[in-house]
Amino acid sequence: MDVRTSKLTTNYLFNNEKAYGWVPGIFLGPVVGLFLIIVAMLPAEILLPSLNLMTADGDFIGIQGFVAFLLSAFPLVGILVLSWVRWVERRSRDSVGLNRDRSLSHISWGLLVGILSSLWVVLSIAVMGGYELGNWFSGFESWQNIGAITLLLFCFIIQSGVEELLFRGWLFSSVTRRHSIALGMLASATLFTFLHLSPENPWYTNINSFMFSIFACYLVLLSNTVWVAMGWHAGWNWLIGTGFNIPLTGIEIDIQASIVELSPTGNDFITGGAGGPESSVACFLFFLIGSIFLHVKLIRRTNKARVLSIV
């Protein structure tokens, strides 16, 4: 029986492996996830300000502070998640989407799709008159900046990979085991949105964060692995963060643009304002249309009645 078909009716994602420990449900799953994140983030929050890499308010000091945070906090999150899966839920890495089959090709394909996805959003905003164009390829004027752009690709692969492992690999699969795919999506998207809340961003940014997570869940369902979503998330973050000198999830990265410097000129609803393109209406439309498209592909892959039964 094909795993990609059976998982829609058995509430098992990735494989049919049984968990021999405790698997949290819809209410405790996000609580456990939040606890793991807080524990993993504490050392970086304490250490980086003492090294002048982060302010007391949690703002990064230069590109060095941003890189230090990504490389110190997120690997620890990943270690805690995998430890939880191994020792508490007592199931394998394959059961959270880290199957070894074609992992490199999956993450590479996801990386390409992520780059093209974010490029589509930025181009859509530009077509709607949301940006003024500045200097082209200024990021390649110095070897130092080229090195920073390259290093950030590595950093985003780690950061995005860990986030996808936590939200779409572990939490999505855990809640799905206890309930349904729909509730698994809800739990994953709710915690992801909560952790991306910012008083500086407009309210509709939260909707986009929620839709981001739903879209990523569909990538996981269709690929039957978390590697594709990891690559897609990394490519998305990397191009927005280094390509255009615009904010990434509200964070200004101190780096010259690898493609073209863009200055927001339109309404915040179009450009995303301080939140960057991820807070824009173009981003919302991308995730909405993309999620519908992937859902239709999922229906065509399986029996329609079985897909509807996940609700």
Image: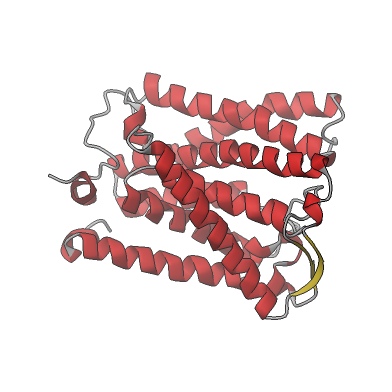
Residue 40 horizontal side relative to residue 84, left or right: right
Which of the 4 quarters of the picture holds residue 119? bottom right
Q: How many marks?
A: 0
Quadrant position of residue 151:
top right
Name the residue rendered at 70%, 65% in the picture: 202
Q: According to the image, what is the colour scheme of the structure?
A: secondary structure
211 versus 75 height, above or below: below
Residue 190 visible in the current orientation: no
Left or right placement of residue 116 versus residue 92 in this view: right
Residue 139 x, y percent position in the rendering = 78, 52
Which residue appears farthest toward the bottom when viewing the image?
128
Viewer-closest of 166 and 263 = 263
Residue sitting nearer the eye, 203 or 262? 262
Q: Quadrant of residue 272?
A: bottom right
Q: Residue at x 61, y 27 (%)?
A: 40
Image quarter (top left, top right, bottom left or bottom right) of the N terminus: top left
Relative to 208, is 249 above or below?
above
Q: Position of residue 49 (x, y in %)?
A: 83, 29
With 256 as the anchor, is 114 left or right in this view? left
**133 up-or-down from 2: above or below:** below
Q: Position of residue 55 (x, y in %)?
A: 85, 36
Q: Is residue 52 visible?
A: yes
Residue extending furthest top?
Answer: 87
What residue appears at the point 85 percent right and 24 percent down from the top-left corner? 50
Could you say where residue 84 lies in the image, as x and y percent from the top left?
43, 24
- In the rendered image, the residue lying farthest to the left is 1
Screen quadrant of the C terminus: bottom left
